[in-house]
Image (cartoon, rainbow, N blue to C red):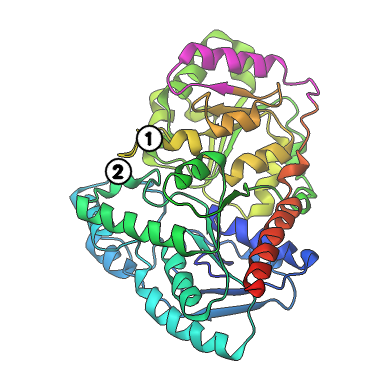
């Protein structure tokens, strides 16, 4: 299993395959992990190392990344971390940062980990000659991982499953990279080669599957992100248990400028002005990195006295906040349509959504009503979906949620999205490609 993200990496990128590897042994597969030894992770969460199964083999090799050059170029300290998702915490995105994005989009194809491809291929070909492997898995982004797997597959004949946690050419921040026509065509060519040559494609949602089926005749299956039932057996801190009179709106994870929707904060401000009880009970909690635009919005709409910013917490502590929230806020990126017409907000289906479901608290999602995320959460009437800019509907949803804050809505977790169930689906696909290859 080839993955750039692996503990002690924190954040969203590590969760999917850490959980798959945690449960694969139940279904007859022994995962072997290949990852970077000195990766430039945006966040560190050492608590996730406890999730790694005992005795699992983790192979690490050094990686060279251009982030030291990037830090020098943009004036960042050598030991600072490069935040992912084009999130600007200080609100100082100047010419140098814009130029660095252009360099990223046009020179580092498919991504800044491209320099790890050749040495990884050389190392793993030698390793495979001395060790038996039944299948290869690559997960992206970064999509350089797929190019490593592609070469191994072509040179060894070992079946290969390519897992896409996000799109490639049409990833939601593609427009920010300012790719030239040449750079876009190179990415399209690499994407097409991966989709056509692997034994099996896996994506996280139906809309992404629809996009990829327009590009390849290869088999594409959907295995969504999910939640780990074991994560939710946490002890709730006493101070959270004592907040019975608090109406807490909680967001976990990062919010970049495209996920910061001013209409939401404006609606809350108006609710505070119009409803004294609402304002007396309100607490807004952000857990994770946030763009400077979020803090500006909080100040603009005079919500700073209601708001708590927590930069980062270990994953197990985040679960406690999710389970005790009055409302879990899910903000979808508001990106425009891509050159090919693929509209990212409709396809977004984050791992956080499924953890929100497992927390069994009402969800307030801000995004397209015809999106796949909306399809998932609308199955429970306790949840609400609001548009990006409709202040009146936002206020109405908040009023409903506030009025029902003490009601038992019986928001039940869906077993279809359990990481154990999903790992069984993955193992069945691995069984299939391994048997097909052996049948040859």
Q: Which residue is mark 1?
A: 335
Q: For numbered disc 2, what is the local secondary structure? A: helix
Residue 413 placement (x, y as % from top left): 76, 38
Name the side, left or right, on which 4 lies relative to 433: left
Mark 1 packing: few (<14 Cα in 10 Å), some, or many (20+)?
some
Instruction: Pick the residue in front: 412 or 187.
Output: 187
Q: For numbered disc 1, what is the local secondary structure? A: loop
Instruction: Pick the residue in front: 166 or 50.
Output: 166
Residue 142 placement (x, y as % from top left): 43, 61
Q: Quarter holding the N terminus?
A: bottom right
In three-dimensional space, the C-alpha distance between marks 1 and 2, rounded to whole angstroms, equals: 9 Å
Q: Is residue 266 visible?
A: yes
Whether the magenta-drawn stretch holds residue 69 is answered as: no
Is there CB contact under 8 Å for labels 1 and 2?
yes
Q: Which residue is mark 2?
A: 175
Q: Is residue 97 above or below residue 162?
A: above
Mark 2 packing: few (<14 Cα in 10 Å), some, or many (20+)?
some
Give the magenta part as a residue range: 385-409
Residue 402 placement (x, y as % from top left): 66, 18
């Amino acid at each position: 299993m080839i993955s750039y993200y692996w503990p002690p990496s924190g954040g969203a990128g590590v969760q999917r395959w850490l959980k798959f590897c945690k449960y694969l042994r139940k279904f007859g597969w022994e995962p072997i992990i290949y990852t970077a030894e000195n990766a430039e992770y945006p966040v560190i969460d050492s608590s996730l190392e406890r999730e790694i199964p005992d005795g699992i083999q983790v192979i690490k090799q050094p990686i060279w990344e251009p982030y030291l050059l990037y830090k020098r170029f943009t004036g960042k300290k050598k030991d600072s971390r490069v935040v992912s998702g084009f999130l600007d915490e200080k609100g100082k995105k100047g010419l140098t940062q814009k130029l660095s994005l252009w360099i990223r989009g046009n020179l580092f194809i498919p991504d800044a980990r491209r320099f790890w491809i050749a040495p990884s291929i050389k190392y793993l070909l030698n390793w495979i000659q001395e060790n038996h492997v039944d299948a290869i898995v690559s997960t992206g982004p970064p999509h350089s991982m797929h190019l490593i797997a592609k070469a191994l597959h072509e040179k060894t004949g070992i079946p290969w499953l390519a897992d896409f946690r996000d799109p490639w050419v049409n990833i939601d921040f593609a427009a920010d990279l300012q790719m030239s026509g040449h750079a876009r065509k190179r990415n399209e060519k690499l994407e097409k080669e991966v989709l056509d040559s692997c034994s099996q494609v896996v994506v996280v949602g139906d809309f992404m599957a629809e996009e990829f089926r327009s590009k390849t005749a290869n088999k594409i299956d959907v295995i969504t992100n999910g939640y780990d039932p074991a994560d939710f057996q946490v002890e709730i801190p006493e101070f959270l248990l004592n907040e019975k009179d608090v109406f807490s709106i909680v967001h976990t994870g990062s919010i970049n400028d495209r996920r910061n929707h001013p209409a939401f904060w404006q609606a809350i401000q108006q609710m505070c002005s119009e409803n004294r009880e609402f304002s007396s009970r309100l607490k807004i909690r952000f857990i994770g990195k946030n763009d400077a635009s979020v803090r500006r919005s909080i100040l603009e709409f005079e919500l700073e006295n209601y708001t708590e910013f927590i930069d980062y917490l270990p994953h197990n502590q985040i679960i406690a906040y999710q389970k005790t929230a009055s409302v879990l806020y899910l903000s979808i990126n508001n990106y425009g349509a891509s050159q090919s017409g693929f509209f990212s907000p409709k396809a977004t289906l984050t791992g956080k959504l499924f953890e929100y479901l497992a927390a069994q608290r009402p969800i307030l999602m801000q995004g397209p009503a015809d999106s796949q995320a909306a399809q998932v959460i609308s199955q429970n009437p306790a949840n609400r979906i609001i548009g990006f800019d409709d202040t009146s509907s936002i206020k109405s949803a908040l009023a409903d949620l506030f009025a029902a804050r003490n009601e038992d809505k019986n928001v039940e977790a869906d077993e279809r999205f359990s990481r154990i169930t999903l790992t069984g689906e993955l193992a069945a696909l691995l069984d299939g490609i391994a048997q097909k290859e052996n049948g040859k």
